[in-house]
Image: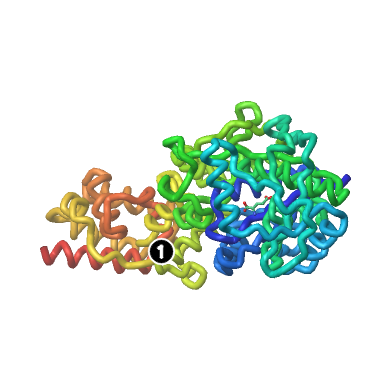
Amino acid sequence: MTVITRFAPSPTGYLHVGGARTALFSWLYARKHQGEFILRIEDTDLERSTKESVQAIFDGMEWLGLSYDTEPTFQTHNFPRYKDIIATLLETGHAYHCDCSKEELELLREQQMAAKEKPRYNGKCRDMNKPQSDKTVVRFKTPVDGSITIADLVKGDITVANKELDDLVIARTDGSPTYNLTVVVDDMDMKITHVIRGDDHINNTPRQINILNALNAPLPEYAHLPMILGSDGARLSKRHGAVSVMQFRDEGYLPQALLNYLVRLGWSHGDQEIFSISEMIEFFDLADVNGAASTFNMEKLLWLNHHYLMHSDPTEIVPHLIWHLGTIGIDANTDKSVDLVELVKAQRERCKTLVEMAEASRYFYQEFEVYDEKSAKKAFSEGSDDVLNHLKNTFAQLGNWEKEALHDVVKNTAETLELGLGKVAQPLRVAICGSGVSPSIDITLALLGREKTLARLQRAISHIQRA
Ligand code: GLU
């Protein structure tokens, strides 16, 4: 049997990290079993679904590298099929037309609430054989007896008596199908073997199983993933910080770090914390998913991000850095003056995010506006224009612009002028970076290149002489 899983988001907002974790687990499970992974856009709520959200889902999936095996499907393209199935359920006596009015249903609800009963439809039209009209909905005839047991792969067995469930609406008055119907039809038609989704759907599952049974369809396995909570124990939401996948990109996280973070949210493999994608695929199993909610910890994500910045092949980080440089007005695809692999190597130790790395790299591309006041005050003292002048003349004549040679120039200058190394390196650093913080001076010079170095030295000399 080929394992087929799906991720079935409703495009009504951004791609939330909770959704991304569901997508990741479904994707991993399919990849682990050499199965298929389907992306199904559940866009039947025409009022709430937007094109932008669909795009956000595509962008998020692509950025995370969660590839799907077939073209994404849209439920709005499948209305004729849902209509057919509704007709079949009516023909086989598994569904009926109901013309109970909103007011009637509201009254019923109030009465049930007053009697402290669970509000639900009382089945009034169930055996009345009402004809269809523009005021009727179609309801599914939930079996009155028996029960449904979900053998949930994460939560264990969950049994619900059918008498707890009412006759749910499967088509609205305008004939449009409802969520529980469309999910069932698609899961059946797509031959989904494992429905992996958030546990907010657990109440829907017995209803969906009843519909599948009525259609004589095989049942998929179910795995309901626990919620993700914010640090205060409430369901993770915007007020806890970034929750949209693309916001994590914007804030400078690597997709690999986010994936590694998400895979550990509710799943574990011994006490291993760092997983390559292939290890995730190899080790992942639904049986190891914890049934209890997990808490989102930004600090840990930041720690992982730094880990991946430090230990990834720099060539893998470069495209992400280019993207971030772009957001601060630096087109590193066109301006190739800086060796990006070396830049990543030089910056990654002190940067926890790509936003920091891009910002800390700005002076390699753009002239800084002003010197950091404190650093300039400390580094530019009387006589430092002579030091910088000496350096400028030596750099101008230097045969090769490489780290070792540059290091020697700084060292020899200190010796020649009989100064401590700091008295040379600090004015030099502030002159070329605008502040006292940079990677080691030789690497900084090598990355900056001769032309910018000479121009900035001249700028600093004039600045000191003007002061
Ligand atoms: N479209 C549903 C949602 O976004 C998910 C349906 C499912 O996974 O069965 O919550």
Residue projecting furthest to the front: 128
Report which residue position mark 1 lands on.
449
Outermost residue toward the top in this view: 270
Horizontal side, residue 105 vs residue 306: left or right: right
Image side of residue 94 versus residue 161, left or right: right
Identify the residue at image location x=46%, y=66%.
Answer: 326
Q: What element carries label 1?
A: loop
- In the rendered view of the protein, which quadrant contains the C terminus? bottom left
Give percent across and percent down for residue 40.
70, 59
Residue 113 image point, x, y percent: 53, 41
Mark 1 neighbour class, 10 Å CA radius: few under 14, some 14 to 19, many 20 or more? some
Q: Nearer the viewer, residue 58 or 144?
A: 144
Residue 443: percent from the left, percent from the top?
Answer: 41, 53
Q: 137 above or below 199? A: below
Closer to us: 342 or 371: 371
Q: Nearer the viewer, residue 426 or 262?
A: 262
Q: Is residue 303 visible?
A: no
- The number of numbered badges drawn on the structure is 1
Ligand 1 is within 8 Å of the C-beta of the residue at disc 1: no
- Quadrant location, the N terminus: top right
The way the protein has been coloured in the rendering is: rainbow
Picture quadrant of residue 10: bottom right
Residue in the image at 42% along x and 55% along y: 355
Residue 61 seen in the current view: yes
- Asked if residue 455 is positioned above or below residue 69 in the image, the reply reads below
Report x, y in % for residue 206. 73, 41
Q: In this view, does 248 lie to the left or right of 209?
A: left
Mark 1: amino acid: Gly
The residue drawn where x is 82% and y is 58% is: 90
Pick the front one: 340 or 394: 340
- Residue at coordinates 70% horizontally, 61% vertically from top-left? 137
In the picture provided, is 236 more to the left or to the right than 220? left
